[in-house]
Amino acid sequence: MHLRHLSIRNFRGLRSLQLRLRRDTTVLIGENQWGRTSLAGALEAVLGPPDRALIDADRTSGAQGPIEIALDIGESQAGEFDCCAPLAALPCSIFGHRVVRLHLNHRDGSTVPTILNADGEPVPLDQAAAQAAHDALRQQIPVIRLSLWNGMGRTEGATVPDAAWTSAVNAWMAPDREGPPSRHALLQSAEAATSELSDRRLHDAASLDLVAELRALPTAWRHAERQPANADRVCAMLIAAHALLRADRRGVGQGVRPILLVEDPETHLHPTLLSNLWSLVEQLPAQRLVTTNSPDFLGAIDLRAIRRLVRRPERTVAYGAKSKDLSESDVRRLSYHIRTLRGGAFFARAWILVEGETEFWSLPGVASLLGHDLEAEGVRVVEFAQAGLESVMRLAGSLAMPVHALVDGDAAGRGYAEIIQRHDAIAPCRLTVLPANSIERYFWDRGLDGAILESAYGAEAGSGRSAGRAIDDAIRRYTKPGLARRMLDVMAADPERLVPKELGDVVASAISLARQSMRA
């Protein structure tokens, strides 16, 4: 079973949220105080341990109505509901798929579960049957919070010694540690985890693979001094084993698939250790919900798994790329170009879309000369030529990312302008077409011809050379990024006079879009 859809109203920092989840991994990104932690808390209250149930204090400050949380639970394989008596007879089908729709209403210290039909109407069911369905779901898809820096030791019902987990795992997390934990502590933890994993009803392939790796730790540790990556793998395996054991201690039986909540895993982990851990966590028989602020971590995630949370006055909206929005070709290009090379763009408040390197290097410098910091404003400059403008615009639309596009005035630029103008965007989309065939020619026409001539031919260069030839020679001598830096050096002498107006307008517009997105 897996969680298909989550709806939350009046829970802590979330006045209203609708979230569509993937079967495997869903990654949440968003500004601080925009509801990521509240979302994890809501899931834990509904499907976590019984002592994490909803309480009156969870209601959003100032909210008028009750706390309401609704979940759509689908079958991962046909017939799963039939194996669980409280769920087998519940009547709901959505687009041909069997779904259990659980709705919880909490008011005045009491939480009332209701089962809904496909139209969202309550199914006539006695209270005991609805409560039994809720209890069954807590067992079948329990929420397990994968804590990476605290709580690694004491877990109710644990048989692995607390001291072993603490010394073996927390020692790796400590920012001021002098060295790795002792070989004895690590192997003690591995031996205990292997024994417990082997004894329990965890017979899926991922669990068996993890047991085999844990049994091989003595060999891995022998080579850890020569191969530090092995030591990272040791720690990652222990964390993954701990997650499985915590899930099983919740009463998880064979075939049950928990939901792992992983909050900001990069906070206390070196990127190498995080990579090792994530490669294991992906193999665990679980649905994963991850929050992160790490562009590097996003590099390991399917682009379609990302959900960008945006807070509006009365609700929080989760934006993400649907499979129908992006082709496999789009995903390949965007995954490499946008995410791998410019991963921080996903955390921006607005994009400036540009054709190439000169614009990419020039615009942040122009902003700085005018007294602005694009990074601090949440504005990212994103090249689109290599990934394809259509793909980038579809991605921006899916994420509700405001954009200001800057294109050349040549035939290709006019084609780009047509694409942007016909794009049906959720967020604002603005356009500037340069009055020149390239940005280098634009610099030449805006009084920087002397700087380009000097870049191409040296300080003694005279006039009378064609613009096209001089620009080509300057780029050949300094490359496009190098020439952009030289243009910025010249502008720095008198920014108010030498910074071209159109570039200043683009910067001001993008900053305005970013600020508006925070107030929306």
Image (cartoon, grey):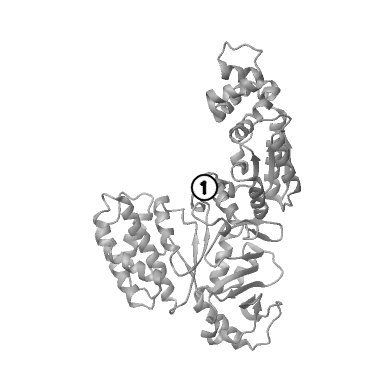
* Residue 512 position (above or below residue 483): below
- Using the image as rendered, state which of residue 284 and residue 7 is in the foreground: 284
Q: In front: 420, or 26?
A: 420
What residue is shown at x 36% (from left), y 62% (from top)?
237
Question: Image quadrant of residue 481?
Answer: top right
Residue toward you, 204 or 231: 204
- Residue 161 x %, y %: 31, 69
Type of the residue with mark 1: Thr
At 68% across and 36% down in the image, what residue appears? Answer: 507
Residue 422 visible somewhere in the drawing? yes
Rendering coords of residue 190 (x, y %)? 30, 65
Residue that appears at 39% across and 54% down: 273
Residue at the image position 61 percent from the left and 17 percent from the top: 453
SS type, badge 1: helix
Report if residue 270 is visible in the image.
no
Q: Is residue 338 left or right of residue 220?
A: right
Above-or-below relation of 342 to 472: below
Residue 57 lies in quadrant: bottom right
Q: How many marks?
A: 1
Residue 18 is situated, as x and y percent measured from the top left of the image, at 65, 65
What percent of the width, then of the height, locates residue 41? 55, 66
The answer to which image quadrant residue 170 occupies is: bottom left
**Mark 1, residue position:** 340
Mark 1 neighbour class, 10 Å CA radius: few under 14, some 14 to 19, many 20 or more: some
* Left or right side of 431 for 484: left
In the image, 484 versus 292, the foreground residue is 484
